[in-house]
Image (spheres, helix red, strand yellow):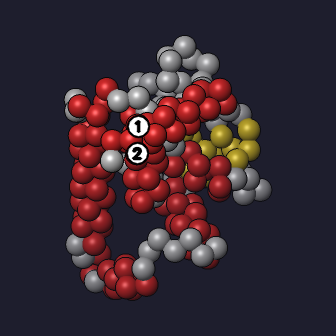
Amino acid sequence: MAEQDKPLLIKRYASRRLYNTETSDYVTLEDIAGFIREGREVQIVDLKTGDDLTRQYLLQIIAEHESRGENVLPVNVLNDLVRSYMVPGGGMMPQFLQSSFEMLRESQSKMMENMNAMNPMSQMPGFEAMQAQQRAFLKAMTGGLSGQWSGPDRDRDGDGDGDTAEDLDTIKKQLADLQKKLSKLS
């Protein structure tokens, strides 16, 4: 199994510090949130007892973001979640939420496929830059829920070194040229 397919194992020490077993360094909750935004699954376990603490820490990440004013969950949704804990057996809420997020990921994935499908605009200069902007917009609107796409491709030429500021300048120039051509057409 590839490294990215396995959950990233984070161990919590008795001091409550969190240890990334892949990079052999300590991480914060914000680091863990970053791993998840990048599409990585995480598993957090207590070093001494072996207890799985993942749910507890994920809820803590959400609570911290909500307390900073990054309100993603409307109050009525939070009320419904609390109510679901009062229903014997937990009700249908967990299955409903899981199905809803799966449908969201699938529809986002299909939308990205449709954007990449062969269309006449793909031959226009700057089309790739427009696609990257659309992907960034979709990611921002959905909070990066897909786990499939984690931002514009950082290695467009496939040489493994990532893109540079020069590449960004080239894209900006292509986009400006495209805007000029479009304004001439109208």
Q: Which residue is mark 2?
A: 183
Say which amino acid is labelled 2.
Ser
Q: Residue at x 64, y 73 (%)?
A: 68
Q: Residues within 10 Å of mark 2 (few under 14, many from 20)?
A: few
Position of the N terminus by quadrant: top left
Image location (x, y in percent) of residue 34: 59, 49
In the picture of the structure, the residue carrying the numbered disc 1 is 181
Note whether 161 is above or below 33 in the view shown: above
Which residue: 28% across, 34% down?
121
Q: Which mark is residue 65?
A: none
From this viewpoint, is residue 152 visible?
no
Give coordinates of residue 75: x percent, y percent.
Answer: 43, 84
* Residue 16 to residue 67: above or below: above
For residue 112, which quarter of the picture?
Answer: top left
Q: How many marks?
A: 2
The residue positioned 43% from the left and 33% from the top of the image is 126
Q: Badges 2 and 1: C-beta atoms under 8 Å apart?
A: yes
